[in-house]
Every structure is written in structure tokens, then in C-alpha cells.
Amino acid sequence: MGEEFDPDNDDEEEERSRARLEKDRAKARFNRRGAAEAGVISSVECEHFMCHTHFHLDFSQQINFITGGKSAALAAIQVGLGARPSLTGRGSSLQSLIQDNADYAEIVIRMRNRGPEAFKHDLYGDTIKIIRRIRKGGTASIQMRGTDNKLVSEVKSELQEMCDHFNIQIESPLSVLTQDAAKKFLSDSTPAEKYNFFLQGTQLTQLAEEYELIRSNVRKIQSAVSQQKEALPQMEEAAREAETKLSEAQKARGQKTRLQAFKNELAWAHVAGKYEVSTFGREGRAAPAPKAP
């Protein structure tokens, strides 16, 4: 006998075929998308940073495994992107990260900046170069340069704007977890410290700080508006006085113009009188006097 037709088996096979097709489509979409083209660190380079006189690391666009020098590389990325030095677990100040017997430390981070999610591509091009220089004297500087090494900005707010654009949460323990923070969280952290870890990781702490900053700015603006309202009557009175003085000055200028015209007429009247006397003496009769121009 031939094999009997089972509609249930046919439905199952069709479902498996549909699942395989969807899986292949998803894989194709992923392959087309590929690795991120913007907001990805391509390299980090340091001089006189921590215990390293010089080191350079190139990163792939996806997962990187580092053996040896992990802490220095991570600290360099944190400090280079604007994190507080205390969060690195390697020093309480920027100066403490400078190599012994050196006068400065320098961190250079290069980031990919291509595709539709690029940050100010018209200024930076395909690569953003971030240079953080720390000096023993206590000063530190930030430079942001483009693909052609042209200086674009030297203010930290530009660096923060870039991190916000790429959603780089450099101070979040869920984004960057140092060895010290991991050990403390797993071993001897209290419930309160775990909750603070949660607040930092979800950026609720940052949100609360921003709300407080906004409230402080609102209070300052309200105080400034109140002061200006109090000074408004005096300013309006000063404006009226100024308008009165302007009107008087314009009238005085008009009178001065008329005075000059009268002086001109007087001068020509003297000329006309002299002309009439001279002509009458020569010819015995008066001639028409010249007129003022």
C-alpha cells in the first residue's frame, strides 16, 4: 500500500519551512547591516599614562578580547571620554594618573564616524579624534579634531554632546564595570550600595542631578526677572528722559542750520552793499547787486 496522506504532517513541514525562511531573512538583514559605523572606538593611544610610557591598541568593530593592560586601556577610555578619575579605581585625581617622573600624560582616542548616525560629519568627517592632555601642574585640556586633524573644539561640552549623541554612558557602572567595582558589588556591598548601583546604572542619579540643575537655573531666572521688573520703572523714566533730550538735540541742530543760513545771507548782503557803492561811484548809477547762491 502507498503512504497515506497526513494533513497534520504537511502543516508542520510548512511551518518549519516558514521558520527557516524567516531565520534566513533575519540573518541576511544582519549581514547587510554589519558592524556599527559610528560611535565605535577604533583605537586608543597613551603616553606617560599610569605605568605605561607608551601603548597603542587597535580595536575591531565588534567584540575585542584584551589580555594584559586591560585596566590601563579601560581607564584611558574612561578619562579620555570625560569620566571622573575616581571612577577608574586607579586614582582620585587626574594628576595621579600621570606616570612617575613624567610631567604630563596624553590620551588619544579615535572613533568611527560614518553613516547616517554620524556626529557632525560635516565638521569631523569619518573619524573623530579626542585628545586629553593632563599636566603635573594641575591643568588638563581637551581637543576634538576631525579626519584631517583640523581642530574643531576645545570645550568639554562638545565631548559631552558627542557622548550623548552616541548614547555613551561613560560613568554608568552597567556600561563600564571596573574590577574594583565588580568585586565590591559581589562581595561586601550593602543593600543601599546595591540600590545606588541600580540608580547609577539606569541613569536615575544623573536624571535627578539634571532636574536639580534645572530647578536651580529656574530659580536664578526668576530672581533675575524679579530684579528687572523692579528696575523697569527707572529704565522707562530714563528712556523718556533720553527721548526728550533727543528731541531737544534735534531742535538745536535745526536752529544751528538756520543760524548758518542767516550768516551766509548776511555775508552776501555785505558783498551786495559793497558792489552797489562801487558801481554807483564809477557809473553814477546803481547796478543790480549779486545774489547769494
Image: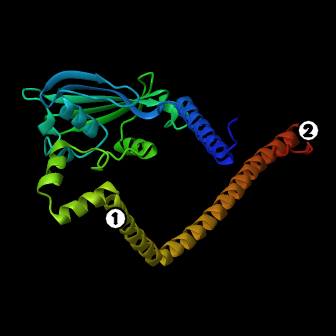
In front here: 82 or 115? 115
At horizontal 34% and vertical 66% (from top left) the residue drawn is 212
| Residue found at the very far left of the displayed protein | 101
Q: Nearer the viewer, mark 1 or mark 2?
A: 1
Residue behind mark 1: 208
Q: Residues within 10 Å of mark 1 (few under 14, many from 20)?
A: few
At horizontal 37% and vertical 65% (from top left) the residue drawn is 211
Find numbered disc 2 in the image and state the secondary structure of the residue it sits on.
helix
Give me the C-alpha separation between circle 1 and circle 2.
106 Å
Give the amino acid type for the residue marked by disc 2 in the picture. Answer: Glu
In front here: 131 or 65? 65
- Residue 33 sits in quarter: top right
Task: Using the image, tell me which numbered label, if any, was put on residue 25.
Answer: none
Q: Residues within 10 Å of mark 2 (few under 14, many from 20)?
A: few
- Residue 112 sits in quarter: top left
Specify the quadrant that holds the C terminus. Answer: top right
Up/down of 211 relative to 169, above or below = below
**Residue 163 x, y percent position in the rendering:** 39, 43
Specify the quadrant that holds the N terminus. Answer: top right
At horizontal 50% and vertical 30% (from top left) the residue drawn is 34
**Residue 45 x, y percent position in the rendering:** 27, 25
- Which numbered disc, 1 or 2, marks the residue that appears first in the sequence? 1
